[in-house]
Image (cartoon, coloured by chain):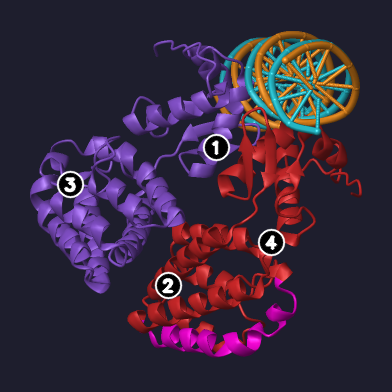
Chain colours: A red, B purple, C cyan, D orange
Amino acid sequence: MTRVRRPKDPTELSAAEWVRQQLIEDIVAGRLRPGEKLCEVKIASRLGCSRTPVREAFRHLGALGLANFEKNRGGNVVRLERAMMLELFEALAEVAAACAGLAASRAEAQRRSLAERDWPHAAAPAGSGGDDDLFSVLFGVCGNRLLSEAGATIRCRLLPYWRLLGKAAEEWPVHGAPGQAETVRAMAAGDGRASRRAMRAFVLMARDQAVRGLPCSVLP
Amino acid sequence: MTRVRRPKDPTELSAAEWVRQQLIEDIVAGRLRPGEKLCEVKIASRLGCSRTPVREAFRHLGALGLANFEKNRGGNVVRLERAMMLELFEALAEVAAACAGLAASRAEAQRRSLAERDWPHAAAPAGSGGDDDLFSVLFGVCGNRLLSEAGATIRCRLLPYWRLLGKAAEEWPVHGAPGQAETVRAMAAGDGRASRRAMRAFVLMARDQAVRGLPCSVLP
DNA sequence: CATGCTGAGATTGTATACAGCAAGCATTTT
DNA sequence: AAAATGCTTGCTGTATACAATCTCAGCATG
């Protein structure tokens, strides 16, 4: 893998933090693939720092659920099994539904802004980094940082697989748009119950499509 | 603070992990109080290890939201403000409601076992460590590890303040029991919608009582 | 041929050394 | 006297050294 050096900009970014961001990006973007071994020394030399910041970053990845580490045996990028992916989607559905429900009861101005946007692409686990898709905006206006973070974390864990959907993901906007639009309408109208229901259904539909789309070789 | 040494039992517990557990217990039990400064050197010497494992534990506390760390300036045990406590309770209500809803749709045997227990004390943020209160059991039977963990984490962040409620907490079982019983009944009956509603109302009631009970000196 | 042992190499866990940042205090300057 | 400046001290961030543990090829043995 190509060697990267951290920009020599000592402003506000410790090596540990930089490494952490770098590794998360690498995992989400698929440069570090599910199941891949994470070796402190190799990562450290690739990123041009010592093992210490790498270790701290590793522990953070572990806390986020993006990697597994066993004592004295190093770690791997988490490789989801079907059951776990179903759980992740289920949890995402619940958290997103809760966010939608709360968002529906927030200040009307914010909600109106939701209805007026045009939503770029489907949002289920969705666009790799852009922060203007349904979820990112939803998490922004729901008014509860904890739910937002929980949702964002869960989404992060699904993203590595999103890329692998390939063609199936291309069809997403087509099938996803109606559910997404319905959710947005309900939120804009301030109907909490309908928002929850629509959001939950939307994510669960995404789940079915994703689980169907991934062959057993990548999702055992 | 009294000096503690980790048991010299090399079975399956790295120093870092031990320190982490120790610090979490200290925070939840109030031995390390909200706002208290966390100094690597002092903690390390108190726990009889070097700074390295302590640093890793610190990062983990940060990820859990139990402590804040600023670059080059060390950290403190998180001190909640009223607004944040409200957010935590709100998030807990949503997550617990989701768990209750899911639990209501799981295998009947598990649900029946819920109805037959007798519930020791109220459960809102509740009992410091026991794992037989409503929440712990709920998280166990809801069948979704992610929601369980999210809920447990949020609860952990509230626990340090629970202790401070003092007399108000004593009254808890009285006011809390009805809502709790209703929630359990609904889950045992397999009524998802009622389970969610009852659980949400139950936690939000706990919130109001907690926020009322804490003076401004401890909850700015 | 299968099985178990062994020792070298690799990798992690922990301790320590060193450098850099931050806050407080004393001294100087106006 | 008040403000500015430069030390001093304590702490954190990172690198590196050392110890403990795991892995696995190679060999002996049944």
- Counting the numbered discs, the total is 4
Quadrant (top left/top right/bottom left/bottom right) for the N terminus of chain B: top left
Looking at the rendered image, the disc whose residue lies closer to the viewer, 3 or 4, is 4
Verify whether residue A164 appears in magenta: no
Label number found at residue A160: 4
The chain ID associated with circle 1 is B
- Residue located 52% across and 83% down the image: A114
In this rendering, position of residue C19 left or right of residue A12? right
Magenta range is A165-191
Cα separation, mark 1 vs mark 3, equals: 29 Å
Element at badge 1?
helix
Residue B217 pos. (x, y %): 28, 38
Cα separation, mark 2 vs mark 1, equals: 28 Å
Cα separation, mark 2 vs mark 3, equals: 27 Å
- Residue located 33% across and 80% down the image: A193
Looking at the rendered image, the disc whose residue lies closer to the viewer, 1 or 4, is 4
- Amino acid found under the numbered disc labelled 3: Ala
Tell me if label 1 and label 3 are in contact, CB under 8 Å.
no
Element at badge 2?
helix
Label number found at residue B60: 1
In this rendering, position of residue B135 left or right of residue A175? left
The chain ID associated with circle 4 is A
Q: Which residue is tagged 3?
A: B122
Residue D10 drawn above or below residue B33 = above
Picture quarter containing residue D15? Answer: top right
Q: Which residue is tagged 2?
A: A97
